[in-house]
């Protein structure tokens, strides 16, 4: 296959009175060999989308194409997709070895090759010593790795990985993320990774499709998601700790391009944003600024605001400072601060280019139309 | 709670259990000793609780009547055929209900099927007789009895299998489709093994019903086909019922179900708890 094309895809459950529109007009094009993450909170439609891609769910309207071939009516076993399930879905009456070799057996692959492949994949996933056990005897993390292995052992057109890291502990997850990335680089196969964890999505993928409320919010690489979020949802969802949002007023030229938050807190905008605001002709907006872009150290060419420290959340390798300025609260990410205490007066620096402005109604990023 | 209190409660509970065991095992005990008594002793005004003379020969005596062995064979033919049919149809119907008819329609249809089992059978005895009389094979035949028992066993089998299939995780089938199996292959290779313990339980329940059924067997059959419950009342001598032979024959008739239960008990317990404990 070459590309995976999704055009105007819709999914409606229980059409009629209690209908649920799970996926709305989704358009997505995934290039051959790309690693794409479907990211979004639970209930955003990402699982419905992938179930339609693999053929486990019927399509209400729209098309799914692998290359030039329309997949809509194709049964799952004919689509040549491999999937690792969040609930593992290991066959309980088969041993781990049989589980791993099952997809190969179905395809009538010779038993010596099967054994060789199973051993390879088991070694990679560190489950070699479990091959003779039944899935019921294993821990969640072990089962998850077997489920991943069963998907990876094949040579499908697309790999679909549904929340495959959700039951692994942090240490193992980190290791597996690295392994998965390596596997992808070796296989160069299209992989779709479904997750609600932005860290996993950003760490692994070439591109991330952020979904919310049944709709695609933004599809892009991590840079664009992080620095040019299309709307408030993406700005909020991507990045940890979450973006600071403040409701602000804008009086155009009179305030020299400043957004007024409350009575006396002002944030400067850069020239592009000022132009955009002037073009949009709005006097109110939500501004967003990432805690990573606020600093307690002076910045070259930066502006500053003053406030009082409320909480110093000391996390070892960094500190999250919660600061209040005239009743407005916001967070600042800083290097570890041992000596700051509640009530200390702080000067917080920022670059005007890092102040994002969102439309008060559409919640979309206000930007100059190119 | 003090230790002596816990001990006391334990003793009380064990005492209850003892009473319960005596209560439930006594009929069986009485059946056993009666089957070993001579005719004179079974009618003693003060019944003996331990046979004064042992007559193990009763067990051979029952087979002096060639009808005895035939009735057991008839019962086997009817109950095994009925169980196989119930299981086959019930499994397929249960799967369809569990997977393809979800929501209000499926729920109501399933309940409607089960409600056949709640219908008092006595109400349809006469219509059933005429109905089977009109068939080419008539009332007194294996086919009639097998089909009739299906009326009672199939709803139960369908309902139970539906419950077992609902508890079998859907993802396993989906995984199998994606791994390349067709739905039919998936059903036989992946799904059926999952509900196998349940199938054993269903088979046992169906089989025991068909094995012990008396009312319809007595009404419909009796000459060409005669199952053992219908045969039991024939152990008489003049106006006297030969209870020792009746009990001996009943003991023999209990061997197949008890034996099968002992062999399959492992699966049966698991089957009935399939929905309770997630494996």
Image (tube, helix red, strand yellow):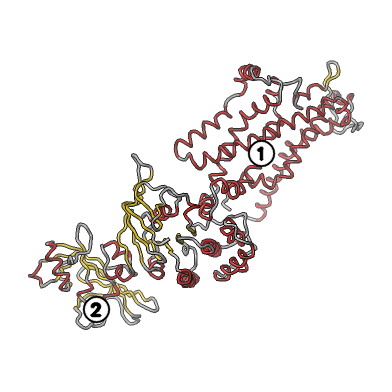
Q: Label 2, on which residue?
A: A346
Q: What residue do we see at 58% from left, 58% from top? A: A102
Quadrant of the rendering where the C terminus of chain A is positioned: bottom left
Tell me the subunit letter for badge 2: A
SS for dot 1: helix
Extreme left residue here? Answer: A254
Extreme right residue here? Answer: B53
Q: Is residue B270 above or below residue B44?
A: below
- In the rendering, at what x and y percent does residue A155 appear? 51, 63
Q: Is residue B237 above or below residue A67?
A: above
Tell me the subunit letter for badge 1: B
- In the rendering, at what x and y percent does residue A199 appear? 39, 68
Q: What residue do we see at 69% from left, 28% from top? A: B213
Q: Which mark is residue A305?
A: none
Q: What residue do we see at 84% from left, 33% from top? A: B33
Q: Label 1, on which residue?
A: B203
- In the rendering, at what x and y percent does residue A242 appear? 31, 67
Quadrant of the rendering where the N terminus of chain A is positioned: bottom left
Foreground: disc 2 or disc 1:
1
Residue situated in front as seen by the camera: A235 or B33: A235
């Amino acid at each position: 296959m070459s590309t995976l094309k999704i055009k105007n895809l819709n999914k409606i459950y229980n059409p009629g009175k209690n209908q649920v529109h799970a996926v709305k007009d989704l358009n997505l094009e995934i290039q051959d060999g790309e690693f794409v993450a479907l990211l979004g909170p639970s209930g955003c439609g990402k699982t419905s989308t992938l179930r339609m891609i693999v053929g486990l769910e019927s399509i209400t309207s729209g098309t799914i194409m692998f290359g030039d071939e329309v997949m809509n009516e194709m049964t799952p076993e004919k689509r040549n997709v491999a999937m690792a399930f969040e609930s593992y879905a290991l066959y309980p009456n088969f041993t781990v070895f049989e589980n791993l070799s099952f997809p190969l057996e179905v395809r009538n692959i010779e038993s010596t090759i099967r054994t060789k492949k199973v051993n390879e994949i088991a070694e990679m996933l560190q489950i070699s010593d479990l091959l003779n056990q039944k899935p019921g005897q294993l821990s969640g993390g072990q089962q998850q790795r077997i489920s991943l292995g069963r998907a990876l052992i094949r040579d499908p057109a697309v790999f679909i990985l549904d929340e495959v890291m959700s039951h692994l502990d942090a240490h193992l997850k980190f290791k597996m993320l690295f392994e998965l990335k390596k596997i992808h680089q070796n296989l160069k196969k299209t992989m779709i990774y479904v997750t609600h964890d932005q860290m996993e999505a950003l760490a692994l993928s070439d591109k991330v499709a952020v979904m919310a409320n049944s709709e695609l919010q933004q599809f892009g690489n991590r840079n664009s998601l992080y620095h040019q979020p299309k709307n408030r949802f993406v700005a909020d969802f991507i990045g940890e700790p979450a973006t600071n949002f403040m409701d602000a007023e804008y009086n155009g030229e009179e305030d020299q391009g400043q957004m007024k938050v409350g009575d006396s807190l002002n944030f400067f905008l850069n020239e592009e944003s000022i132009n955009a605001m002037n073009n949009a002709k709005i006097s109110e907006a939500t501004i967003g600024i990432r805690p990573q872009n606020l600093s307690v150290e002076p910045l070259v060419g930066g502006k500053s605001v003053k406030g009082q420290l409320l909480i110093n959340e000391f996390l070892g390798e960094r500190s999250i400072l919660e600061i209040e300025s005239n009743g407005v609260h916001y967070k600042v990410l800083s290097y570890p601060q041992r000596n700051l205490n509640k009530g200390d007066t702080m000067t917080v620096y920022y670059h005007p280019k890092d102040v994002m402005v969102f439309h008060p109604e559409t919640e979309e990023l206000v930007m100059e139309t190119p | 709670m003090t230790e002596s209190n816990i001990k006391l409660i334990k003793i009380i509970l064990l005492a209850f259990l003892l009473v319960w065991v005596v209560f439930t095992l006594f009929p069986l005990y009485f059946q056993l000793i009666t089957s070993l008594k001579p005719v004179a002793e079974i009618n003693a005004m003060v019944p003996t609780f331990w046979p004064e003379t042992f007559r193990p020969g009763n067990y051979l005596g029952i087979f002096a009547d060639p009808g005895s062995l035939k009735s057991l064979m008839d019962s086997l033919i009817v109950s095994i055929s009925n169980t196989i049919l119930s299981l086959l149809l019930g499994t397929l119907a249960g799967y369809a209900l569990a997977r393809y008819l979800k929501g209000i329609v499926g729920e109501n249809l399933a309940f409607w099927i089960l409600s056949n089992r709640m219908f008092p059978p006595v109400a349809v005895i006469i219509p059933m007789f005429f109905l089977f009389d009109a068939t080419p094979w008539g009332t007194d035949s294996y086919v009639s009895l097998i089909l009739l028992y299906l009326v009672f066993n199939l709803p139960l089998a369908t309902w139970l299998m539906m419950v077992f299939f609902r508890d079998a995780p859907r993802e396993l089938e989906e995984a199998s489709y994606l791994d390349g199996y067709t739905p039919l292959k998936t059903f036989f290779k992946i799904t059926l093994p999952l509900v196998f313990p349940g199938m054993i339980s269903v088979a046992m329940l169906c089989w025991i019903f068909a094995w012990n059924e008396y009312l319809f067997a007595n009404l419909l059959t009796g000459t060409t086909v005669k199952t053992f419950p219908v045969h039991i009342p024939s152990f008489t001598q003049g106006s006297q019922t030969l209870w020792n032979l009746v009990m001996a024959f009943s003991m023999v008739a209990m061997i197949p179900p008890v034996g099968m239960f002992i062999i399959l008990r492992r699966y049966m317990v698991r089957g009935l708890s399939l929905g309770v404990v997630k494996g």
